[in-house]
Image: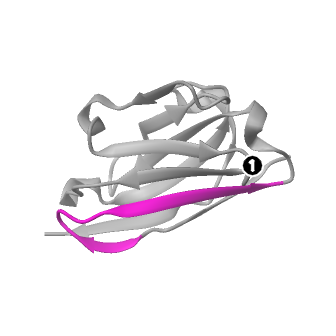
Amino acid sequence: QVQLVESGGGLVQAGGSLRLSCAASGRTLSTYGMGWFRQGPGKEREFVAAIRSDGRRTNYADSLKGRFTISRDNAKNTVYLQMNSLKPEDTAVYYCAAGVYSIYPRAYDYWGQGTQVTVSS
């Protein structure tokens, strides 16, 4: 079993930045692809970013390329999501997930509880 805990969310003004962290316990993350997803108010869960287990390949939602960066530190068993130039439409609960490197939620076996990000205009 893998337990995932997200942190770093909060309230930020438009144009600001946040860095989300996803810390794992129970197993090493080094063999898992990791993903970030988000769910805004009244919206379905959507893919944000993913990173392969070795960190050498990443993938982003087209609309977020250039603003968001996913990274991982396998020694710290932690994955990060750096979010810059935030917009009100980025407001959502952000979830990290561990599984197979993919843009699809069904590829991930383990999920965190989510962290709220609110961007004010």
Asked whether, in this view, residue 38 is left or right of residue 83, the answer is right
Please identify the dominant SS of the magenta region. Answer: strand
Helix, strand or loop at mark 1: loop
Asked whether, in this view, residue 66 is left or right of residue 20, the answer is left
- The spot of residue 2 in percent (x, y) is 80, 48
Check the picture and name the quadrant holding the C terminus: bottom left
Q: Is residue 101 above or below residue 110?
A: above
Query: For this rendering, which residue is in front, 36 or 16?
Result: 16
Does any portion of residue 70 appear in the rendered image?
yes
Q: Is residue 7 above or below residue 71?
A: below
- x 20%, y 57%: residue: 87
**Residue tagged 1:** 75
Q: Residues within 10 Å of mark 1 (few under 14, many from 20)?
A: few
Does any portion of residue 44 appear in the rendered image?
no
Query: For this rendering, which residue is in front, 38 or 87?
Result: 87
- Residue 5 falls in which quadrant of the image? bottom right
Q: For the magenta stretch, what is the residue range?
A: 10-25
Q: Is residue 9 above or below residue 27?
A: below
- The spot of residue 83 in percent (x, y) is 35, 54
- The spot of residue 7 in percent (x, y) is 55, 67
Spot the residue most to the bottom: 11
- x 75%, y 42%: residue: 29
Q: How many marks?
A: 1
Colour mode of the rendering: one colour
Q: Amino acid at mark 1?
A: Ala
Based on the picture, tell me whether residue 112 belongs to the magenta stretch.
Answer: no
